[in-house]
Image (tube, coloured by chain):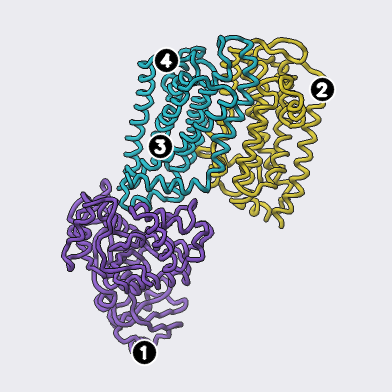
Chain colours: A yellow, B purple, C cyan
Amino acid sequence: MALATSFGPGVLGRLDGSVKRSGAVTRRNISALRSAYWLVVISGFFEPLLYLLSIGVGVGGLVNKMALPDGRLVDYAVFVAPSMLASSAMSGALAETTFNFFGKMKFMKLYDGVLATPVRPMEVALGELTWAMIRGSLYSAAFLVIMVVMGLTSAGWALLAFPASLLVGLSFGGLGMALSTFLTSWQDFDVLGTLQFALFLFSGTFAPVSSYPEAVRLLIEATPLYHAVELIRGLTTGSPHPVLIGHAAYLVVMGILGLAVAGRRMGRLLLK
Amino acid sequence: MSPFRRPRPAPDQVTGPVGATGGAQAPDAPMIHARGLVKRFGDFTAVNGIDVDVARGESFGFLGPNGAGKSSTMRMIGCVSQPTGGVLRILGMDPRRQGTGIRARLGVCPQQDSLDPELSVKENLVSYARFFGIPRRVAKAKADELLEFVQLTERADSKVEPLSGGMKRRLTIARALVNDPDIVLLDEPTTGLDPQARHLVWERLFRLKQQGVTLVLTTHYMDEAEQLCDRLVVMDGGKIVAEDSPRALIERYSTREVVELRFGAASLEDMAGKLAGLGERIEVLPDRILLYAFDGDEAAEAVTGRGLTPSGTLVRRSTLEDVFLHLTGRTLVD
Amino acid sequence: MAAVLSVLETDLMAYRRTWRASVLSSFVLPTLFVLGFGLSVGSFVDRGGQLGPVHYLDFIVPGMLASTALQVAFGESSFPVFSKFEWIRTYHAMVATPLRVVDILGGDLLFLLLRLLTTTVVFLAVTSAFHAVHSWWAIAVLPVAGLLGIAVAAPIFAFAARVDQDGYFPMLMRFVVIPMSLFAGVFFPIDRLPEVLRWLAYISPLWHAVVLCRAATLPGFGVSVLTAVGHLAYLAAWAGAGFWLALRAFRRRLVI
């Protein structure tokens, strides 16, 4: 499963390299959906689904029922599905805001063109984020529909989990924007990809954090994907608890901080 | 000082005995010999029956607009493309059967850069030399020597990427020389370079020529052809339309001098009518009229003598460009 | 042979500068996975008892080993090969030397083989430290990983020589490589798959390598000599056909 992050940097960035500039940043991204790029976008939906089927259903068949925090016992797929939703919201938002954004900023000099117009850096950032959100929300909605069809959650809880998945995307989008202003070379993506992969593995995604040693557990609880997974799992498994508000608050704060940092640093980076 | 020791025995190559047979050819036999050479790609005929002979130590040029068949011809000579028909002998060998043996004794400088960005400048030369079966120690010494020759010694350990276009081209030329080739093939060696870089490349190629290396090059820069070529052919539509030394071609297909006349806003076609009978030939361009004459000053006086007042008059010597445009037409093939 | 080795030498020269990035994808990530997934999820699977006395960690280690070989093979055969034709054009430079097309292809595949073997050795060493390797037969995974790598890479070499844009590789990754990694017996036995998917797993080279690797590291999963030969023959067929296709594609591209 080194898969998700194993293909080298430059993949998505190069794909929309032929795209023309446009003042409206979000619209530019939608118009970027050309030739092979739309297939990449579509495939972004299949990936979490395939993981769900392989790990949730396939490996799940080898696992007894899992205990939720409220004591109920559920199938492993019910436990894993919200993790996949949260992880794909994270990686979608990060890919779009770090990888693509970085390529456009550093190599295609795309924003130099945009910024020659009255558009301000922060508006650029928000435009990019909006695009990441639109794409991410489509993935999330489709994934939730499949969860309902597979009986992994109910329609009502899925409706509540949907805005939560948007929050996850927004929050990681903000983080990604901020991170991208610190990246200096494509090599940094290898490091970023590895960190992201570690989050994907350890954030209570495949096993409850309570099964980890105390020190590891505390470390995990400080990282963002953990909160995203817990928030979404709380909703899709239908066990609302006040602590969910805490998880949501973590994500809101991270998103706002990310955007604030991105806005400040981007202005400095791009306007010199 | 010179990196080239000549004459020298055929290099001992990975290809073994094949490479050796060509070395036995008669000293005055042509390095390249083509008769009725044809290259087709499906229905398209890129090279349509050309005859070429290149002698040892000669500097030979293929001129022509894009699509004339120059590059296809060069690829056949470089033994990376099989002739569809006709005879082709390189160093006395048959490229259909002895491609590796021939390539072992060629140096190729392609039109597009193909340097390895993951290797340093020097490593590019060493690794390339290894493809020729040159021992590593010899390859390293050779690389130093060649870097000196193309004036890149101080960049030996640099990466390739930050080099300027001219430096990359010089490095590519150095790479083409690692095996002390009998023939160096240069496909548009200075296309895309700025004037200083072009002159530096020309100067290095001229040094090679002086050292007796056989150069075969394609170009569409007329000044390049005049500078470097002892003899050249003009190709158009896959055929050779003229062949000779630059000077002889100018004498045959152009006049000694050319008068360039400008007439402000006046209709050039009308003006051309009024110039009829002057010089040997008149050509109307979008912005000026060319008047071909043996004595340009005399022709220019004749123009004013007819009561015409050009807004600009330039008398210059005829160049290969005039020949080229005369032979291949003025429509831009691109 | 000297010609093939000179190509390998160039690949190694370049790898001296780029090996760091490959350590992440071919070593750090799989190790993280074995720890993160194999140990934590493994404890639940072991409690489920579906795999009998076999620990889940032990079960997925040989699978991950084959899967890592698949990743390395994809990584070395997609963008790099495409790049040598389209971007940096070094194949075009090489073919102008005495090298034959088969030397160039052979040299690059030999380099891939070295990458596969070193990756596999390191992977074996690390997983042995976690007591996930149970037989000296584990050495046999080396040729298996090598063969799988060539079986996968050779057809991708051919593909990379024929496509005109790199946009096809993410597709190949997402629609072929990832599904193969997820459903070819790496994470769970394929008899749990629906009939149709099981046949897809049979077709994939990865499954055959997973079976062989598992047979080598896990005593309970041994296969008969005849079965082993069958799996090896299937992988060899992919490798052979792939090599032939790649050679044709390279010739078409370089010697026209």
Q: Element under label 3? A: helix
> Nearer the observer, disc 3 or disc 1?
3
> What amino acid is labelled 4 in the image?
Val
Q: Are marks 2 and 4 on the same chain?
A: no
What percent of the width, then of the height, locates residue B313? 42, 83
> Nearer the observer, disc 3 or disc 4?
4
Whether label 2 touches label 3, CB < 8 Å: no
Where does label 1 land, which residue?
Answer: B301
Q: Are marks 1 and 2 on the same chain?
A: no
Marks 3/4: CA–CA distance = 33 Å
Residue A135: in sight, yes or no? no
Labelled disc at residue C159: 3
Where does label 4 land, which residue?
Answer: C223
> What amino acid is labelled 3 in the image?
Phe
Q: How many marks?
A: 4
Q: Element under label 1? A: helix
Labelled disc at residue A243: 2
Examine the image and state in which quarter residue C248 appears.
top left
